[in-house]
Image (cartoon, rainbow, N blue to C red):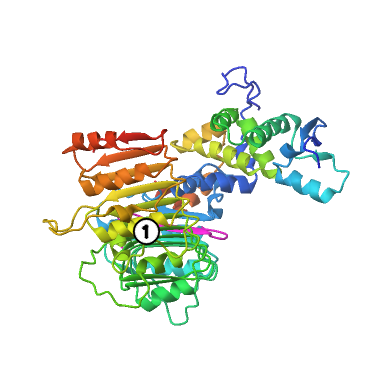
Amino acid sequence: MSNMKTREQPKVPCQMDMEVDRISALPGHIIDKVLSLLTLRDAVRTCILSTKWRYKWVNLTSLIFDNQSVLVSSQDPTIIKNKMVKIIDHVLLLHNGPIHKFKLSHRDLQGVCDIDRWILFLSRGSVKEFILEIWKGQRYKLPSCLYSCDKLSHLELFNCLLKPPLSFNGFKILTSLDLQHITMDQDVFEDLIYKCPLLERLTLMNFEGFAHLKIHAPKLTFFDIVGVFEDVNFENTFVLSTVSIGLYVNIGNDHELTLGTISKLIKFFASLPSIQRLEVQSFFLKFLASDMVPRRLPSACLDLNYLSLRINFNEMDECLAALCILRSSPCLLELELLARPDEEPVPKVAAKNLQEEDYQNCFFTQLRFIKIAGIFGVPRETNFISFLLANSPMLERMTVKPASQDGGWELLKELLRFRRASVHAEIIYLDP
Amino acid sequence: MTSSKTIVLRSSDGATFEVDEAVALHSLMIKHRIETGGADSTTIDVPEVTGNTLSKVIEYCKKHVEAPNSDDLKSFDTDFVKVDQAVLCHLAKASYYMNIKGLLDLSSKTIADMFKGKTVEQIRETFHIKNDFTPEEEEELRKENSWNLFV
């Protein structure tokens, strides 16, 4: 009965590899773990291996329906929809036990109303992670039962419309929220953030329906937002340490300066006392610089060690704002400056230049790495670079990548000439 | 508490292994036993694991406790699971009973990778799984449609 190894060569270097089925007898937890590392498709297909394996897959705690786990050869939306609905209904019906993670992200599936039914099913359990990505078609309006999934710790939505019922009380244990290409009203947004007291990570990308970002999140440590908004107010965000903000709309140059209001720059940093990593993208620096820019911030950003700024070197306000931040960040280790070209085709004739005094009292005792990209080599840019080099005694490396090959030689010659405070500094010129 | 304190682990077949306490604590099961066992817990029985497997488990724990940041940790792990199925399954079970997450993850992933890219027949062959469905059961399975939906 037993197959002695005398007749066959062992497949692996070991003498005692009897042809015993060991895997089917592994403890359930290990099998669950192994199956969870396969695509849903591969996991379900184990049902055919033997009678023991017929229902091993039904205990999966993580169900991921995407292009890898559901193969549809057709491009016809109706056929795709029918197959996907059949599959998900089938899996949910045969499934046994808790579902901790549910992800639906099939590139060819539009927002079908069957999704409502599946969310209802999940809301009766204790789903912890819910990810829904609608790749085709219009915003999918989420059913009210989603808002009663009170065990959620991670919610990720793409191309959805959020309109919770009036009875919505927040997600009490939600720690991570990722909303991209979504629509919701202003009050819904504020309410949502406010009613998720344990929120630690918030990602917002391309949103509609609200323009004032009021972020009241006492446990928030990570915040990443890119989109169109009018203002951002951080309230009670004292542990927020990583922030990335990109404002997609050019706020224009003729904004009224209302006297007596705290400058946007001061207000922004005052509400982020623990900031460690900051990325300021697209037009946000221009936004921050749009009213009074102080020479330095009232309190220094002692924890800020990484700063990335998208900056238009031709805009004096933005340069002053950058200098203000730099002057107030004594512990900065890494700096990245990404040049944003002028928006108007013809640059302003009377644009002012920074003066010697604007650069004063700005010394980088910890700065080790500087990255500069997208520049053209004009004086406004090279002066800034020269200033950085002259004031960074601990600098290890600066990389410079121009926007184009034009003027590359001139730029190189200038870079060579600049005085460096750090004898160890490498300056690396990268081809555009 | 000196760092040179050693613990003796005894396998199911009576083999004993003396290890540094720090290494032994990599197993959360042993950690729990020590913490709740009182001052005299210098010998811990591990009846679910044989001597051969326990020796390998200790080798894993030693490497991960003594050099967790070394550059060759990844290659150590890769080579560590280049073993035959019997040993692999023993390691998976041992890491589960002894609550050693890293080793459980490693052995589970290795087993999972053996499923990938294979037909049903190939999987059966790899793991020596016998197709024991009766014709009636096969028919029922076919009707249930789990297989067909995912083909």
Residue A327 drawn at (x, y percent) = 40, 55
Residue B70 drawn at (x, y percent) = 58, 32
In this view of the protein, which residue sits in the foreground, A122 or A314? A314
For the C terminus of chain A, which image quadrant? Answer: top left
Check disc 1 and report the residue beneath it: A324
Q: Is residue A280 visible?
A: no
User: For the magenta stretch, what is the residue range?
Assistant: A95-110
When asked about the image quadrant of residue A59, the answer is: bottom right
Q: Is residue A337 visible?
A: yes
Residue A12 drawn at (x, y percent) = 57, 23
Label 1 Cα neighbours within 10 Å, binned few <14 / some 14-19 / many ≥20: many
Secondary structure at numbered mark 1: helix
Q: Could you tell me the amino acid type at mark 1?
A: Cys
Q: Residue at x 26, y 55 (%)?
A: A354
Instruction: Pick out the residue farthest to the right.
Output: B40
Taking the magenta stretch, the answer to whether it contains residue A96 is yes
Instruction: Pick out the residue farthest to the left.
Output: A346
- Main SS, magenta region, reads loop
Q: In the drawing, does residue A351 fall left or right of residue B42?
A: left
Q: Residue at x 77, y 33 (%)?
A: B19
Instruction: Pick out the residue farthest to the bottom.
Output: A166
In this view of the protein, which residue sits in the foreground, B62 or A257? A257
When asked about the image quadrant of residue A156, the answer is: bottom left
Above or below residue B56? Residue B30 is: below
